[in-house]
Amino acid sequence: MMIWWIIYGMAVITFLNRYFFLAKSISIKPSESFRRFLSFSSLAVLTALWTPIVFRMETDLSWSIAGWDYLLASVIAVALCLARASSLLVVVVSTTAFFLLRAFL
Amino acid sequence: MGNQPVESRSVFWSAIAAILPLSLAVVPWGVLTGALAIQAGFSVMQAQCLSLLVFAGAAQISGISMISAGVAAPSIWGSTVVISSRHLLYSIVFRSHIDGLSFGKRVVLAFVLTDEMFVVSEAHTRKTGAFSYLFALVSGFTFYVIWNLATLVGILAAGRFDQLGSYGLDFAIVATFIAMTFDQLSSHPEILTVLVAGAAAVLLKPYLHESYILVASLMGMAVGYGLSQRKDSTVDSRGGSS
């Protein structure tokens, strides 16, 4: 029973976070400059999601790269992006490279 | 509404095409989430409802691991608040697009609002110059269906995926996000946004637990915004056109 309550609680919390600023009763009228600020959000969030998976840092400030397989495959992905490869090609080739690196390194 | 069927059909398919690579990239995580839930003592129904109702990968996985560690409900909810707080940011952005939408449509939009849906929808908005409710909804629900099917597979196969996390399947997510990041890079403020948000996320993660995503994003956005303001005023002072 406890697990059900935890699930319901989590569902309400995640929904409210998603809905909060969509609610009509929350009257915010974003200004032009605020919108411009927000226009950087998807790029910023994306980057903040993937960089810590590739580079890991411990609280004692020792650098650790999650593994050379991650770093090398990321470099391959970036290189393909700079070469203007399509997104799908970038994902397929670099992920394949990742698994090969994993298998052979 | 519906007076341009051809156009909406193409929006429909482009939404699916945009979200599909991201949906497939999180399949391993969906499978993992289902399998972990069963191992943590969830019933089949509970494990599936976690994905059906909560529909937030990071929150689900941390919730499951806290339940199996015997953590009390209030602490679990507290970490859910922090982890899902980044959605506040997304809802602010969407808010500026959705003035005319009814209550029901807003609720539905909120329900399928995820990192992935937000990212592809914003990319679509930037490309076409206008927010598309249809695009957001189709990409959001496609992601929802695939996430739940992946969870179901994990539930059914629970026990055989003990080591899934250590296979490094998270690289598919990294590759997808790298491709999407570079896809959107076109100006100096954007490049600076990426550098600052990326460095901040790496440096802050050990200290801030899951809120590092929100904090690092805000830092990157502030730098990007500041730089874009300065660039504008430079253009203005040179008498450039508006």
Image: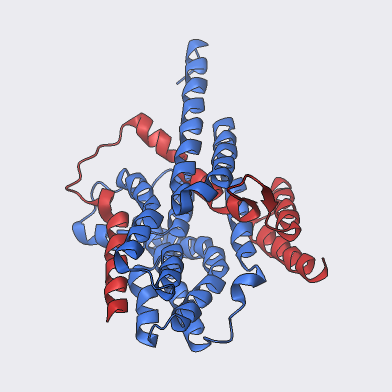
Chain colours: A red, B blue
The quadrant the N terminus of chain A occupies is bottom left
Q: Residue B140 falls in which quadrant of the image?
A: bottom left
Residue located at (46% from left, 54% from top):
B210
Q: Position of residue A28 (x, y in %)?
A: 24, 39
Residue located at (60% from left, 38% from top):
B195
Compare residues B127 and B115 and report the one nearer the observer: B115
Q: Is residue B127 above or below residue A34?
A: below
On screen, residue B164 versus residue A41, left or right, reads right
On screen, residue A53 versus residue B66, left or right, reads right
Residue located at (31% from left, 32% from top):
A31
Q: Position of residue A104 (x, y in %)?
A: 83, 69
Residue B4 shows in the view: no
Compare residues B146 and B85 and report the one nearer the observer: B85
Q: Is residue B118 above or below residue B142?
A: above
Compare residues B9 and B237 and report the one nearer the observer: B237
Q: Position of residue B128 (x, y in %)?
A: 46, 46
Residue A10 shows in the view: yes
Q: Is residue B91 above or below residue B27?
A: above
The quadrant the C terminus of chain A occupies is bottom right
